[in-house]
């Protein structure tokens, strides 16, 4: 890969793990996803040429691996449903009760967003990718990034401020 020093690699891996953790919502799965991302990047290092684009390229790999995993999980879940199995997990961490409650409410609102909206918000707002880099990472046009990001921010704002929009109803005659 590129000649990054140890500190740059640590920072990059922390960013990848944070993104993976938000996508998967499971520390073990996030670690596995980051490891798979690094493995894929190392085996295909000849495809990536510019040092400046390394971060966006790694986020692209991570996101695509995540989507592939989700597709496989849906298929696997269908198979398990034939045998009547189901799983759910919940988790809470913190020290100040008021902050914990507010943080959990915000995280629950964030979790209600679609995967695409969460990915965009994380890449642009948390990881600091430009719209162009996010568009490349998610393989969508830059205009789509801007419109989806706007809708994601509005949806998150509605969910966290307690004024969610009512669902659109069809009029039946």
Image (spheres, rainbow, N blue to C red):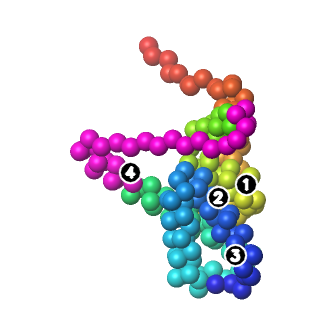
Give the distance between the C-alpha atoms of the residues marked 1 and 3, in whole angstroms.
Answer: 18 Å
Tell me where residue 72 sits by quadrant.
bottom left
Are the residues flagged by discs 1 and 2 in contact, CB closer than 8 Å?
Answer: yes
Question: In this figure, which residue is indicated by the disc labeled 1?
Answer: 126
Tag 4: Cα neighbours inside 10 Å, few (<14), some, or many (≥20)?
Answer: few
Question: In this figure, which residue is indicated by the disc labeled 2?
Answer: 18
Mark toward the start of the polypeptide (1 vs 2): 2
Give the distance between the C-alpha atoms of the residues marked 2 and 4, in whole angstroms.
Answer: 23 Å
Dot 1 lies on which element?
helix
Q: Position of residue 115 (x, y in %)?
A: 56, 48
- Quadrant (top left/top right/bottom left/bottom right) for the N terminus: bottom right
Q: Position of residue 101 (x, y in %)?
A: 67, 33
Question: In this figure, which residue is indicated by the disc labeled 4?
Answer: 74
Are the residues flagged by discs 2 and 4 in contact, CB closer than 8 Å?
Answer: no
Using the image, determine if residue 137 lies above or below residue 8: above
Dot 2 lies on which element?
helix
Are the residues flagged by discs 3 and 4 in contact, CB closer than 8 Å?
Answer: no
Whether residue 34 is visible = yes
- Tell whether 58 sits left or right of 69: right
Residue 96 belongs to the span the image colors magenta: yes
Give the distance between the C-alpha atoms of the residues marked 1 and 2, in whole angstroms.
Answer: 9 Å
Mark 1 or 3, which is nearer the eye?
A: 3
Tell me the residue at 64%/26% (across/down): 165
Tell me the residue at 38%/43% (across/down): 87
Q: Which residues are magenta?
A: 73-99
Whether residue 64 is visible = no
Question: In this figure, which residue is indicated by the disc labeled 3?
Answer: 9
Tag 1: Cα neighbours inside 10 Å, few (<14), some, or many (≥20)?
Answer: few
Give the distance between the C-alpha atoms of the residues marked 2 and 3, in whole angstroms.
Answer: 14 Å
Give the distance between the C-alpha atoms of the residues marked 1 and 4, in whole angstroms.
Answer: 28 Å
């Amino acid at each position: 890969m590129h000649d990054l020093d140890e500190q740059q690699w640590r920072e990059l891996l922390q960013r990848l793990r944070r993104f993976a953790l938000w996508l998967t919502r499971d520390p073990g799965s996030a670690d596995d996803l980051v490891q798979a991302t690094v493995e894929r990047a190392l085996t295909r290092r000849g495809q990536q040429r510019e040092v400046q684009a390394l971060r966006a390229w790694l986020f692209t790999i991570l996101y695509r691996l995540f989507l592939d995993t989700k597709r496989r999980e849906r298929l696997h879940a269908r198979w398990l449903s034939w045998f009547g199995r189901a799983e759910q997990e919940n988790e809470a961490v913190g020290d100040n009760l008021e902050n914990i409650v507010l943080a959990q409410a915000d995280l629950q609102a964030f979790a209600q967003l679609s995967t695409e909206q969460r990915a965009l918000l994380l890449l642009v707002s948390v990881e600091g990718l430009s719209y162009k880099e996010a568009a490349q990472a998610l393989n969508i046009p830059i205009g789509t990034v801007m419109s989806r990001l706007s809708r994601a921010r509005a949806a998150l704002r509605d969910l966290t401020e307690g004024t969610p929009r009512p669902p659109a109803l069809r009029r039946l005659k």
